[in-house]
Image (spheres, rainbow, N blue to C red):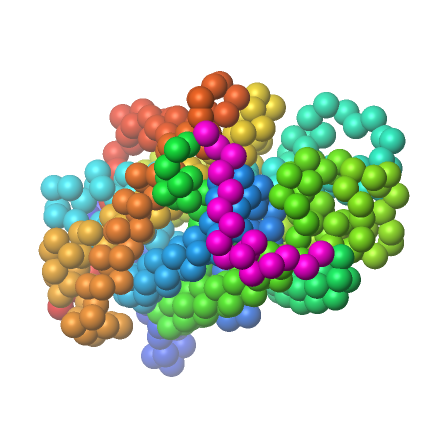
Amino acid sequence: MATEAAKAEEALDAVLATTADGFVDDDAADLAALGHKQELKRSFGIWSILAIAFTTLNTWTSIFGTLANALTQGGLPTLTYGFIAVSVGQIFTALSLGEFAHAFPTAGGQYHWVAEAAAPKMRAVLAYITLWLSLACYVLLTCSATILVGQAFTGLMILANPSADLAPNTVFWWAEAIAVLSALMNIIGMKAMPMFDNIGMIISFVGFIVTIIAIPAAGGVTNSASYVFTDFINFTGWDSNFIVFMTGLISSTFGMAYLDAPTHIAEEVPHPRRTVPLVMWTTVLVGFVTGFAFLLVVGFSMGDIETILNGPTAFPEFEIIRVALGGAANATLGASPGIFVLCLLNALVPVGPIPAMEQVCGRLIYAFARDGGLPFSKVLSSVDVRFGSPIAAQLLTLVLVLVINCLYIGSTNAFNALIGSSVLMGQLSYAIPALLLLVHGRDNVLPVKWLNWGKLSVIPHIVSIVVALWYLAFFCLPYSLPVTQYNMNYTSVIMVGFLVVGFICWFFVDFKGPLHTIDKK
């Protein structure tokens, strides 16, 4: 069996052998130096990778689709001030991630960074834990997104035909159908994926502009500044408004998390050392601007909170649109064409990111299997030459999403738990490499010639760790009291479940970490 160094040398020799006239493909050579051959096509330009990053965050529509949680846990002040606090933390987190992504542009992302930063004895274990956190984050994100789309499409059905007798679990079946269609895009439609991602970004921007213009222009409701900034609402049973505020931040974090998405497409984009960090930073800033503008528009134009939460479509996003555009609360639905079209546009926006989310999941599985970290690694790391896709990895992603979505049948509250688990596990996967960098020293972790924030370098990494501890402390608490099986927060259960599966898999693999780590000097 070839040693790690020999494998890396063979990969680099393969790159040099295929270049003409002594010209070296820098991206392929970079990847070869990290021990991997260039198997995926670099077919995603900067706009396509930006589209993946932006639509994965999709800040404004993520908040719009999940604001019911925050409305009962503090109301609009939780959304407004919470979004600002979360955004500050995520901007620093993006700076931390960018420094790593610039140095190690591989599809493995955080787990590869941890392997580079950890002490040799802990390298494999910490990289393995980080990968499971990262993989669970994106699987659960995809589940959350499909359920959100299922809720939106079910609400559209009610708008279109208020007297319809909907089948049980209509939301669930919509979610499963969207997951299957997205998987097909990633298996047989890879050539069209860059175009699809770009279209998704355009639809999101169009939806944002139309929504923030149409809602206040209709003049249906005008709220006071105190309603938006100071009227704290507590429907939870918690005595502490501080805890209510903290547990109500899920909507804000859902719209500003998943900053690492571009890193997992790094092997499919030209010049990833420069492109990936720039895309991360651009995305988080655009997300903050669009998200905050949207919150202000909705805050001043939405109706009574109880009316919004108890509306006939059972989807607060549509109830805000109905009330703002003149629909009376709980009146005969018979939505006007304008209301229905705006609701339809808002339902289509979250569809666009789901293929990209499944793509990121598949690339994580592919990268992990390529390094021997999963059972059946040879199968899961294979790339189909015809379609340019790791088909087995994408199919496994689909199976995981279809199975986990079944939790929604047992409890609709599982939706919030999926979001909370996803955000928490993702942030923990960011904090581990940051912590190792601080412990071992930047010069001993990152190559000295790469992006360097100088003496300020420690600040983004410290903030990234603090944010992770912040989420860990509050996102596992019950949403309301007293706790019952129906309102329980299953975030900790889901997180432990994923880690237990990873622990079991550990005994069936011989994982040593990425095939090769580079000389930091």
Up-down relation of residue 278 to residue 394 (above or below) = below
Q: In the rendered picture of this protein, how many numbered marks are placed on residues?
A: 0
Toward which corner of the image does residue 145 lie, by quadrant? top right
Q: Percent x, y for residue 241? A: 40, 41
Q: Which residues are magenta?
A: 221-237
Would you place residue 311 above or below residue 120 in this image? above
Residue depicted at x 80% and y 48%: 327
- Please state which of residues 251 and 51 is positioned toward the viewer in this rendering: 251
Question: Can the viewer see residue 128?
Answer: yes
For the N terminus, give its image quadrant: top left
437 left or right, relative to 58? left
Residue 131 magenta-highlighted: no
Q: Position of residue 331 (x, y in %)?
A: 83, 39
Q: Determine the residue positioned at 67% across, 67% down.
A: 209
Lateral position of residue 66 relative to residue 378, left or right: right
Tell me if 462 is positioned left or right of 417 in this view: left
In the image shown, does 404 or 26 lie closer to the viewer? Answer: 404
Q: Position of residue 362 (x, y in %)?
A: 48, 45
Residue ID at (50%, 60%) = 53
Q: Residue at x 27, y 57 (%)?
A: 463
In the shown orientation, is residue 204 left or right of residue 79? right
Above or below 168: residue 202? below
**Magenta includes 224?**
yes
Residue 20 position (above or below residue 103): below
Q: Position of residue 315 (x, y in %)?
A: 68, 40
Residue at the top extreme? Answer: 485
Seen as rendered, the residue at the extreme bottom is 21
